[in-house]
Image: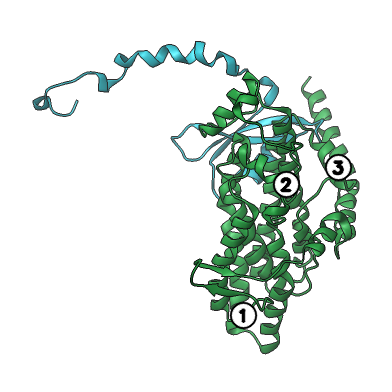
Chain colours: A cyan, B green
């Protein structure tokens, strides 16, 4: 079975929400991956839509790139609404 | 549950000063409660211990379907049959979540399953006991899944991310198992004939001690616990979890109106826990080494299922290839 393709499974739990990664399944092809994912991840109304993609098709960031990629946004507090202080009489903005 | 004797390959805990820079960073990350993910550096022994523990856990879920499968065609009503099938399907699902978590560590699923089929990998000792009457389905759900829950709830915080996430999913589903088991017993006790009530007591008598053994050897005979705890793979010792299970279960036993086969069981006002009798560890060791009542039967059933299912796997591949060609 390990020779079968490994697929990553993404489920949309409700209309209007994003598909979210839930896990993986082995399958002979994509159609079977969908069937397996349905049995494995949506036995209790967990989803309204399933995506599968071969795991090998996913390109990911490496863990040693974490600082270079994500640290620069840490010191840009001015990108958040809470950075800007307004007088109370302005009310909710 | 379900992982009882997991070798860590380490004799003595290292202090932070004795570790190289990589291992030290790894241990500091664990101490800070940051999850280890598949691509992070980890000591080889941590990786191997996890593969052993997660595969053992997965095998237990898969073999755990067999004692229940025995009762699918014998369930007393259609309702009970549907519930039992849903539970068994959950166990298969739990096995698959766990095999996936194990694969993120670089282990090969076929290889690990082959280790199970050739007797080189363990699974929980509890599944080597037979399920002799319908009340056993109740007692398995209540006691065996109950013990599994006590074991698995802290594993939701285990240090390896994919294992912890699999456990969160498993725990969500597991409480249905325990409640349906308890309800089977309660129904027999409150609405059953005298013979059916005796069946309940008989099931508890046979499964009580094996359920307590599910937590593994006592702390003083658990040489691998210290390392597993330092790595935060395990969050509590075997004896702590066993005590927690007993303390939770005895009040439920009293509601049923049943007893457990332990003359030493009594509430201890001073400690705030139940005292209980000596566990027969030679029985535990016999069963885990392959000499329990059903070890051979369970492994044969697994091997037969795998071998007799070979044509289904081959057909699935042939079908996928045929469709591929039709597209090309």
Q: Is residue B278 above or below residue B257?
A: above
Same chain, marks 2 and 3?
yes
Q: Is residue A49 left or right of residue A83?
A: right
Pick the front one: B90 or B260: B260
In the rendered image, which residue does mark 2 sit on? Answer: B223
Residue B115 circle label: 3
Q: Residue furthest bottom?
A: B194
Pinpoint the chain carrying mark 3.
B
Same chain, marks 2 and 1?
yes
Crowding at dot 1, Cα within 10 Å, few <14 / some 14-19 / many 20+, comes out as some
Pinpoint the chain carrying mark 1.
B
Residues tagged 1 and 3 counted as in contact (Cβ below 8 A): no
The tag earlier along the polypeptide, 1 or 3, is 3
Residue at image coords 77%, 32%: B107
Toward which corner of the image does residue B285 lie, by quadrant?
A: bottom right
Task: For mark 3, give the secondary structure.
Answer: helix
Same chain, marks 1 and 3?
yes
In the rendered image, which residue does mark 1 sit on? Answer: B258
The tag earlier along the polypeptide, 2 or 1, is 2
Mark pair 2, 1: CA separation: 36 Å
Please indicate, yes or no, whether residue A61 appears anywhere in the rendered image.
no
Pinpoint the chain carrying mark 2.
B
Q: Is residue B325 above or below residue B118?
A: above
Q: Is residue A75 above or below residue B51?
A: above
Task: For mark 2, give the secondary structure.
Answer: loop
Crowding at dot 2, Cα within 10 Å, few <14 / some 14-19 / many 20+, comes out as some
Task: For mark 1, give the secondary structure.
Answer: loop
Q: Position of residue B233 (x, y in %)?
A: 63, 40
Pick the front one: B284 or B203: B284
Q: Position of residue B228 (x, y in %)?
A: 66, 41
């Amino acid at each position: 079975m390990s020779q079968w393709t490994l697929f990553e499974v993404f489920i949309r739990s409700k209309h209007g929400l994003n598909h979210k990664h839930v896990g993986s399944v082995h399958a002979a092809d994509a159609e079977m991956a969908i069937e397996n994912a349905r049995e494995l991840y949506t036995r209790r109304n967990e989803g309204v839509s399933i995506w599968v993609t071969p795991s090998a098709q996913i390109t990911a960031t490496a863990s040693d790139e974490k600082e270079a990629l994500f640290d620069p946004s840490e010191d840009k507090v001015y990108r958040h609404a809470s950075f800007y202080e307004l007088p109370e009489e302005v009310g909710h903005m | 549950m379900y992982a009882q004797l997991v070798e860590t390959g380490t004799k003595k805990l290292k202090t932070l000063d004795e570790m190289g820079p990589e291992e030290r960073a790894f241990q500091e990350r664990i101490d800070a409660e940051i999850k280890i993910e598949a691509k992070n550096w980890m000591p080889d022994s941590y990786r191997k211990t996890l593969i052993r523990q997660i595969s053992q856990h997965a095998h237990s879920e898969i073999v755990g379907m067999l004692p229940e499968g025995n009762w699918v065609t014998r369930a007393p009503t259609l309702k009970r049959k549907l519930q039992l099938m849903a539970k068994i399907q959950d166990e298969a699902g739990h096995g698959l979540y766990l095999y996936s978590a194990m694969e993120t560590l670089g282990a090969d699923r076929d290889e690990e399953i082959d280790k199970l089929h050739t007797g080189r990998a363990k699974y929980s000792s509890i599944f080597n006991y037979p399920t002799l009457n319908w009340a056993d389905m109740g007692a398995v759900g209540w006691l065996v899944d109950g013990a599994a829950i006590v074991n698995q709830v802290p594993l939701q915080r285990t240090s390896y991310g994919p294992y912890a996430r699999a456990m969160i999913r498993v725990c969500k589903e597991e409480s249905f198992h325990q409640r349906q088991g308890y309800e089977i017993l309660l129904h027999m006790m409150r609405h059953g004939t005298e013979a059916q009530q005796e069946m309940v007591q008989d099931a508890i008598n046979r499964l009580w001690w094996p359920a307590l053994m599910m937590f593994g050897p006592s702390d003083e005979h658990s040489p691998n616990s210290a390392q597993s705890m330092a790595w935060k793979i395990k969050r509590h010792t075997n004896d702590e979890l066993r005590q927690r299970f007993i303390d939770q279960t005895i009040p439920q036993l009293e509601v049923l109106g049943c007893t457990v086969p332990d003359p030493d069981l009594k509430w201890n006002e001073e400690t705030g826990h139940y005292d209980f009798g000596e566990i027969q560890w030679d029985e535990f060791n016999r069963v885990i080494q392959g000499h329990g009542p059903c070890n051979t039967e369970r492994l044969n059933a697994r091997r037969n299922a795998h071998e007799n299912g070979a044509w289904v796997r081959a057909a699935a591949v042939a079908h996928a290839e045929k469709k591929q060609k039709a597209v090309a």
